[in-house]
Image: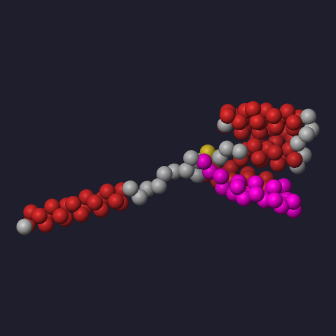
Amino acid sequence: MKASVIKLKFLAAAVAVAALSGCQTTRPLYHYGSYQDNVYTHFNNEDASQVQEIAALEKTILESAAKNLQVGPGLHAHLGYLYIESGQMDKGIVYLQKEKALYPESTQFIDFLLKNAKAGKS
């Protein structure tokens, strides 16, 4: 009877260790910060200030670096678009090219945006 109590305690301890060791969550692949809110605001609120949107996206990029996470796809492209829209063509092109470098699968779309930006069709 004493051996069965020891086995039961050992089994309970093993189950507790197994349950507690599985509590760690996976690390996110990308950091978006306020990106989704910014895109929503940009396309649904004409009163939104481009300066505020740019500042929020710049802050998200800084947060990503601080957390050692990669910025999510589309964030640099949207920031570049905002810069071009606000008349800061050089900065906009830099961010569009950064998006293309980080996410080569976006090359065709970014090239299209760059072509239109250089032609003055932002």
Q: In the image, 9: left or right of 18?
A: left
Tell which residue pokes out farthest to the left in this image.
1
Q: In the image, 39: left or right of 121?
A: left
Q: Is residue 38 magenta?
A: yes
Say which quadrant the N terminus sits in: bottom left
Tell which residue pokes out farthest to the front in this image.
44
Q: Is residue 93 magenta?
A: no
Question: What residue is rendered at 67% in x and 34% in y?
Answer: 105
Question: What residue is rendered at 87% in x and 60% in y?
Answer: 46
Can you give x and y, in whole percent of width and height, for residue 100 in the image?
A: 72, 35
Colour scheme of the picture: secondary structure
Quarter of the figure with residue 93: top right
Tell me, yes or no, if residue 55 can be seen here. Answer: no
Residue 38 higher or lower than 109, as above or below: below
Residue 93 higher or lower than 29, as above or below: above
The residue segment tinted magenta is: 30-51
Q: In the image, 95: left or right of 64?
A: right
Instruction: Depth check: give the residue in front, 3 or 66.
Output: 3
Say which quadrant the C terminus sits in: top right
How many marks are shown on the rendered structure?
0
Question: What residue is rendered at 73% in x and 53% in y?
Answer: 57
Can you give x and y, in whole percent of width and height, for residue 82 in the image?
A: 82, 48
Residue 111 higher or lower than 43, as above or below: above
Can you give x and y, in whole percent of width and height, for residue 85 in the image?
A: 87, 47
Q: In the image, 4: left or right of 118?
A: left
Can you give x and y, in whole percent of width and height, for residue 14 in the image?
A: 25, 58
Tell me, yes or no, if residue 73 can be seen here. Answer: yes
Question: What residue is rendered at 21% in x and 60% in y?
Answer: 11
Quarter of the figure with residue 15: bottom left
